[in-house]
Every structure is written in structure tokens, then in C-alpha cells.
Image (cartoon, grey):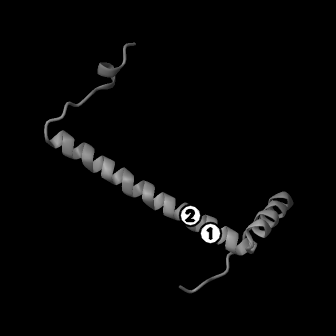
Amino acid sequence: MAKRNLTIQLDEETIRHARVVAAHRGMSISALVAQQLNEMADADERYERARQVALDALAEAADRGAPRWRREDLYDR
């Protein structure tokens, strides 16, 4: 996969902290940011897949005649 540059603006404290974290992990700030963004994107994809599986299961249950609850049925107010 071709790599491209991305410019971001961060405050001095964040940059200092990123340098320390990257150094402790033996990587550059660029590699650290890339790793974190990839992990976030992967987590988001996993969440969306799980969400769709849950919605599909709910729809399937409703199609089989599962009860449909109303808020008023579940909470006494």
C-alpha cells in the first residue's frame, strides 16, 4: 500500500508526550500515530459488524413473532 504524508497540528505538550510514548515503544511518532489510527479504524469496523449482527438478530426475532416492547411497558412512571 502506498504511503502518503499527513500534516497535523498539535500543541507542544501533546507533541512532547507523543515523543516519550513513541520512544518507549521504540517507534517514530509517525508510526505511533499510524498504529493508533489503524487500531481505531479496526475497532470501528468490528463495532459496525457487531451492530449489524445485533440489528439483524433483532429483526429476525421480530419476524418470528417476538414481543415488541414499548417504553411504557418496561418502566413505571
Q: Residue furthest left?
A: 64
Q: Which residue in the structure is indicated by mark 2?
A: 39
- The tag on residue 35 is 1
> Which of the two residues, 24 or 67, is positioned nearer the viewer here?
24
Give the quadrant of residue 48. Answer: bottom left
Q: Residue, x 85% and y 58% (percent of image)?
A: 13
Give the quadrant of residue 47. Answer: bottom left
> Which of the two residues, 72 or 57, is positioned nearer the viewer here?
57
Give the quadrant of residue 30. Answer: bottom right
**Where residue 6 sits: x, y (%)?**
67, 76
Is residue 65 visible in this depiction of the protein? yes
**Quadrant of the image for the C terminus?**
top left
Q: What is the C-alpha distance between the residues marked 1 and 2? A: 6 Å
Indicate the secondary structure of the residue bearing disc 1.
Answer: helix
Please state which amino acid type lies under the numbered disc 2.
Glu
- How busy is the neighbourhood of tag 1: few (under 14 within 10 Å), some, or many (20 plus)? few
Q: Residue, x 75% and y 72% (percent of image)?
A: 26
- How busy is the neighbourhood of tag 2: few (under 14 within 10 Å), some, or many (20 plus)? few
Indicate the secondary structure of the residue bearing disc 2.
Answer: helix
In this picture, residue 50 sits left or right of residue 23: left
Q: Residue, x 67% and y 68% (percent of image)?
A: 33
**Where residue 46 sits: x, y (%)?**
44, 58
In this picture, residue 68 sits left or right of residue 53: left
Asked whether disc 1 touches disc 2, contact meaning CB atoms under 8 Å apart, the reply is yes
- The tag on residue 45 is none
**Where residue 35 sits: x, y (%)?**
62, 69
Is residue 7 visible in this depiction of the protein? no
